[in-house]
Amino acid sequence: MTVSAETETATTPTNLGFGVDVGGSGIKGGVVDLDTGVLVGERFKVLTPQPATPEAVAGGVAEVVAHFDWTGPVGITLPGVVTGGVMRTAANIDKSWIGTAVDELFGSRLGGVPVSVLNDADAAGMAEDAHGAGKDVDGVVMMLTFGTGIGSAILINGTLVPNTELGHLHVGKKEAEHIAASRVKEDKGWSYAKWTEKVSEVLSTYEALFWPTLFIAGGGISRKADKWIPLLTNSTPVVPAKLANTAGIVGAAMAVSQGLRT
């Protein structure tokens, strides 16, 4: 059967963006169909340089972008708080990032193209809210990534409230991530039942403060959601994230397409 040119054109994504997700071990990027939140082709990854200094990481980001011959705007996630185009904290990355003018750094390294640089959890939250587990959900959606710590993102009817860092909120006498991160479960050898008691306590505290419509659970442990989400006792529904390893890339591409500055 012959496929018409019209049919081929109709199925080719035209609203494209580019995102790069900088993590502690890898720098991943790809072209994103902004209408669907799906990567166009495979993502490309390079190892995060050690030490992960600003100049070294910027070089890795440039390598990822060059792999695709991409010349348009680029969204970039970083594991830390970014306000006013400046990195304020540094988690799982070299401490020399603190105080770095990240918009200037990446804009210069990428040849002057527009960039948006934002917190990695915020980017993942944006992607999940628009194209994943939070799609078509009204009100306050909170994404929480359970890993070494607890990353957080809050969106209100699709609008991001950046840099919430709720893992550091004190619940009882300790920070939330010190009692309910998945690393705590591993280190203490807790069962899912024991761990979810702590997670429920944290989620109930967040509920009392923000009254969310939905919690989205991310991080590696979300892949085993059937083993622990049914054990939670908080009131707000909790669902596992859907976009997995592409969420940061998709959210970064969304951010720069929207001209987001945190």
Image (cartoon, rainbow, N blue to C red):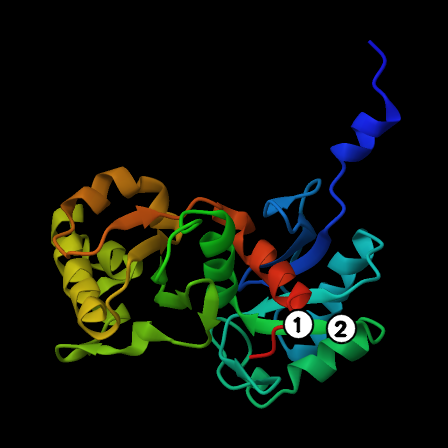
From the image, tell me which residue sits under label 1.
Answer: 259
Residue placed at 55% from the left, 87% from the top?
Answer: 98
Instruction: Tell me residue 126's x, y (percent).
Output: 50, 60
162 to the left or right of 9: left
Question: Viewer-proximal residue, 9 or 192?
Answer: 9
Q: Nearer the viewer, mark 1 or mark 2?
A: 1
Residue 118 against residue 199 in the figure, above or below? below
Residue 227 against residue 51 in the figure, above or below? above
In the structure shown, which secondary structural element does the residue marked by tag 1 occupy?
Answer: loop
Residue 45 visible at all: no
Mark 1 or mark 2: name the one nearer the start of the chain.
Answer: 2
Q: From mark 1 to mark 2, how far is it between C-alphas?
A: 9 Å
Instruction: Tell me residue 179's x, y (percent).
Output: 20, 67
Residue placed at 56% from the left, 49% from the top?
Answer: 246
Residue 164 visible at all: yes
Question: Viewer-proximal residue, 257 or 20?
Answer: 257
Question: Viewer-proximal residue, 150 or 209?
Answer: 209
Q: Amino acid at mark 1?
A: Gly
> Residue 183: which disc?
none
Residue placed at 24% from the left, 71% from the top?
Answer: 176
CB-based contact (under 8 Å), mark 1 and mark 2: yes
111 to the left or right of 133: right
In the structure shown, which secondary structural element does the residue marked by tag 2 occupy?
Answer: loop
From the image, tell me which residue sits under label 2.
Answer: 114
Res 84 quadrant in image:
bottom right
Residue 28 against residue 242 in the figure, above or below? below
Residue placed at 16% from the left, 51% from the top?
Answer: 232
Res 144 quadrant in image:
bottom left
Instruction: Tell me residue 175's x, y (percent).
Output: 24, 76
